[in-house]
């Protein structure tokens, strides 16, 4: 995506966090309370880095609210939540294209998509390049525990690996994505340090 496209998307999505919160709540709060706690924690992390995001703060918070909506039982189609969530936002809500791409690619989703044989669909529908603000969303997701508490990215990766177990495709994907995930978190930490 070029910078102009990103800026236009951000303008379009101003004041969208409240809408995104309600969409996520509707799909996650009752059926998946632990996932809802995690989502609330990810959104809190988005607000905590608002000073680094300028005009994009509301947009990134919206993405934080919606990044895991594809886990909702009523939205599962492929069983790959980044793709199911992004398709739902695109097809049902006609959501901003950049927001859909962020959800589709969140936390190195393309690596896991390859493991699942869904990479061609992901790239065809939501592009091959990680969209702008992907590092910010990685920071929010990968420093939040499954219960919504703050956690280091290293512990988060260990937690995911332990939860799925060795040999699982999610473990293979997160292991391969780890350097990118840690690098993104370090980048945002540096930006936070610079603005404080
Ligand atoms: Fe998440």
Image (cartoon, grey):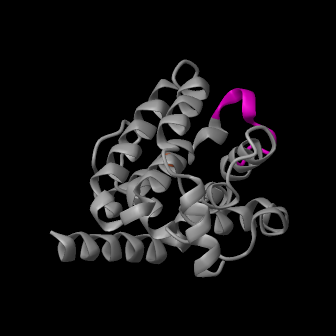
Left or right: where 11 falls relative to 96: left
Residue sitting farthest toward the bottom: 2
Q: Position of residue 146 (x, y in %)?
A: 41, 40
Location of residue 99 (image quadrant): bottom right
The quadrant the N terminus occupies is bottom right
Left or right: where 19 falls relative to 105: left
- What residue sits 61% from the left and 27% below the top? 27
Count of picture labels: 0
Seen in the picture, residue 41 relative to 54 is either above or below; the reply is: above
- The residue closer to the viewer here, 134 or 146, is 134
Queried whether the magenta region covers residue 77, the answer comes back as: yes
- What residue sits 61% from the left and 62% below the top? 9
Seen in the picture, residue 170 relative to 66 is either above or below; the reply is: below
The quadrant the C terminus occupies is bottom left
Q: Position of residue 65 (x, y in %)?
A: 50, 42
Residue sitting farthest toward the left: 196
- What residue sits 66% from the left and 62% below the top? 112
- The residue closer to the viewer here, 25 or 36, is 25
Location of residue 121 (image quadrant): bottom right
Q: Position of residue 47 (x, y in %)?
A: 33, 50
Q: Position of residue 137 (x, y in %)?
A: 46, 60
Residue 172 visible somewhere in the drawing: no
Location of residue 84 (image quadrant): top right
Queried whether the magenta region covers residue 78, the answer comes back as: yes
Residues in magenta, as a range: 72-80
- What residue sits 82% from the left and 62% below the top? 125
Residue 81 visible somewhere in the drawing: yes
């Amino acid at each position: 995506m070029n910078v102009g496209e990103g800026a236009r998307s951000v303008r379009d999505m101003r004041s969208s966090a409240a809408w995104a919160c309600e969409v996520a709540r509707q799909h996650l709060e009752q059926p998946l309370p632990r996932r809802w706690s995690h989502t609330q924690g990810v959104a809190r992390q988005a607000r905590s880095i608002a000073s680094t995001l300028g005009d994009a703060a509301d947009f990134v918070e919206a993405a934080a609210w919606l990044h895991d909506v594809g886990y909702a039982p009523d939205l599962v189609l492929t069983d790959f939540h980044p793709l199911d969530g992004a398709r739902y936002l695109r097809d049902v809500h006609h959501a901003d294209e950049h927001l859909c791409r962020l959800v589709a690619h969140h936390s190195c989703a393309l690596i896991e998509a390859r493991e699942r044989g869904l990479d061609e669909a992901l790239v065809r529908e939501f592009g091959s390049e990680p969209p702008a603000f992907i590092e910010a969303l990685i920071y929010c997701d990968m420093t939040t525990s499954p219960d919504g508490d703050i956690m280091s990215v290293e512990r988060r990766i260990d937690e995911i690996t332990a939860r799925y177990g060795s040999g699982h495709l999610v473990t293979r994907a997160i292991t391969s994505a780890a350097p990118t995930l840690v690098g993104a978190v370090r980048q945002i930490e540096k930006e936070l340090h610079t603005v404080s």
